[in-house]
């Protein structure tokens, strides 16, 4: 079986404990307005064009069999692109990138195994992220047992927005779940992510009650969800469960803006909460809250 991914990041230290290899899967069923990986939205392979890097040398046009051209920083004829990657291969400025490729379980396992020594020495392992990796849960159902057979620890980074049956199939092969609980208010969650959070909270509660090892992750935008009300609601939701080992507050950053622009998308700009606000939110929780 093959999965569709858009990046493999080795020596990752922000996606779970220790040194990890993080595999980013294509496709997501949320539309978070602050997303730092907008190239993960669509399951399809996509062409990204970073206009600020382009020196208009024309090399991409010369090798393109589909006649796609760059005119005034616009891609003309993009609908004809066959994703042959020839433009990407000749662009010396990295202004063109084809985002997404398919990979088999054994090939991906070979990549993950390369850094076993670092996992063992640091308490790290593999993290599957995205996008939403659970949209490819059948691939994970085949792949993760292979990783576990190698004695490598596994973590699942998910927004929790799939049927519970999908998680039941995967959790036996997962040592840690990194679960996004972005906004506790139902209407605000829909406004900023495109979906209500009913199923997300229901799945989170099931995981907590079943003793799943959890790290909660909360992306924070000033004036949106960095409020005392959101912090109190989140803490009330998780405080009785010791298997929630960490509540990680993740201040907003702008890393996704250029990537969104490269896909022809308009992304709104948010503000990062001030340090004093982060300290205040942490103080409303307990020692599990970190940033």
Image (tube, rainbow, N blue to C red):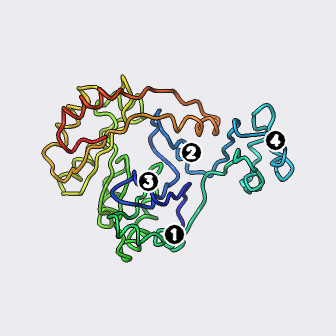
Judging depth in this view, the residue of 124 and 136 nearest the camera is 124
60 left or right, relative to 226: right
CA separation in Å, label 1 and label 3? 16 Å
Quote the CA–CA distance across marks 2 and 3: 13 Å
Q: Earlier in the sequence, mark 1 or mark 4?
A: 4
Q: Which residue is mark 2?
A: 39
Q: Quadrant of the C terminus?
A: top left
Residue at image coords 54%, 69%: 104
Q: Earlier in the sequence, mark 1 or mark 3?
A: 1
- At x 49%, y 40%, the residue is 36
**Residue located at (19% from left, 37% from top):** 235
Q: Is residue 44 left or right of residue 79?
A: left
| Mark 1 surroundings: few (<14), some (14-19) or many (≥20) residues within 10 A | few
Residue position for label 3: 129
Distance in Å between CA atoms under marks 2 and 1? 22 Å
Q: Helix, strand or loop at disc 3?
A: strand
Which residue is situated farthest in the left direction here? 240
Q: Where is mark 1, residue-wise?
A: 111
Circles 1, 4 touching at the beta carbon (< 8 Å): no
Q: Is residue 291 above or below residue 186?
A: below
Percent across and percent down for residue 159 are 37, 46
């Amino acid at each position: 079986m093959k999965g569709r991914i858009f990046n493999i990041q080795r020596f990752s230290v922000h996606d779970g404990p220790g040194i990890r290899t993080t595999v980013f899967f294509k496709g997501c069923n949320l539309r978070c307005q602050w997303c730092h990986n907008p190239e993960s939205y669509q399951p399809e392979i996509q062409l990204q064009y970073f206009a600020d890097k382009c020196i208009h040398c024309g090399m991409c046009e010369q090798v393109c069999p589909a006649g796609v051209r760059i005119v005034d920083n616009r891609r003309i004829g993009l609908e004809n692109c066959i994703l042959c990657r020839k433009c990407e291969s000749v662009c010396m400025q990295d202004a063109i990138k084809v985002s997404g490729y398919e990979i088999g379980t054994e090939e991906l396992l070979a990549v993950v195994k390369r850094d076993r020594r670092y996992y063992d020495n640091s308490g790290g392992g593999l993290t599957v992220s995205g996008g939403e990796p659970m949209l490819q849960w059948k691939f994970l159902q085949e792949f993760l047992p292979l990783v576990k057979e190698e004695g490598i620890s596994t973590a699942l980074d998910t927004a929790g927005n799939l049927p519970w049956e999908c998680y039941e199939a995967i959790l036996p092969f997962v040592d840690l779940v990194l679960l996004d609980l972005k906004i506790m208010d139902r209407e605000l969650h829909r406004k900023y992510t495109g979906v209500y959070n009913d199923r997300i909270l229901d799945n989170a509660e099931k995981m907590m009650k079943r003793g799943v090892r959890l790290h909660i992750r909360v992306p924070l935008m000033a004036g949106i969800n960095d409020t005392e009300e959101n912090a109190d609601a989140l803490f009330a939701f998780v405080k009785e469960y010791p298997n929630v080992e960490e509540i990680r507050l993740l201040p907003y950053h702008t890393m996704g803006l250029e990537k969104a622009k490269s896909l022809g998308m308009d992304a709104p700009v948010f503000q990062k909460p001030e340090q004093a606000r982060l300290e205040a939110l942490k103080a409303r929780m307990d020692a599990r809250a970190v940033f």
